[in-house]
Image (spheres, rainbow, N blue to C red):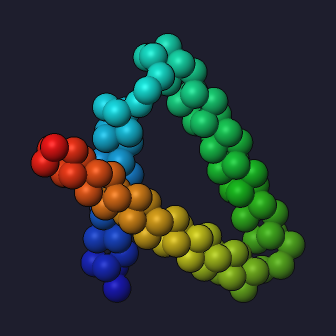
Amino acid sequence: MAGKTTTGILCFTGGALTGAAIGLLYAPETGRETRSWLSYQLEKYRAVLADLAEGLVTSREAGGPSTAKTEGQRVISDARDKAEQLLGDVDQLINQINSRKGL
């Protein structure tokens, strides 16, 4: 079970990094605009993660382990869905790149 989880996390991370690299290479904005946008997105996700962590701690204190486990399973499910979507986006980008090479 741990092997599948580790493999899933590695695949997700690899896909995210590949997608980000391809996106940055083909970005129509200047470097300054891209860095500003990335900073904004990172701050937004940092705030979301902080709220999520605080919610998990609060639910753990209030509802016991079953509430925390349910919330953890929901987070894992959401992460899996987003990873699948990201992998699909990466596949589309790779197909677009390959089709441009054929021109």
Q: Position of residue 8 (x, y in %)?
A: 35, 71
Q: Is residue 17 visible?
A: no
As drawn, 9 above or below 16: below
Residue at 52% of width from left, 72% of height from top?
Answer: 81
> Which residue is pictured at 28% across the width and 71% down the height?
7
Q: Nearer the viewer, residue 35 or 72?
A: 35
Q: Position of residue 23 (x, y in %)?
A: 38, 39
Question: Going by the image, does 28 lie left or right of 25?
Answer: right
Residue at the extreme front of the image, as rendered: 103
- The image quadrant where one finds the C terminus is top left
The image quarter containing residue 86 is bottom left
Please state the horizontal and vertical placement of residue 100, each as a whole percent of the image: 22, 44
Q: Locate residue 47, reporting x and y percent.
A: 71, 42
List the single residue furthest toward the right.
62
Q: Residue at x 13, y 48 (%)?
A: 102
Q: Image point 49% across, 72% down: which residue?
A: 80
Tell me the quarter of the image containing the N terminus: bottom left
- Residue 2 seen anywhere in this rendered image of the structure: yes
Q: Nearer the viewer, residue 102 or 89?
A: 102
Instruction: Please state if 82 lies on the left or on the right of 98 as rendered.
Output: right
The vertical placement of 38 against 48, above or below, is: above
As drawn, 79 above or below 30: below
Vertical side of 91 occupied by 41: above or below: above
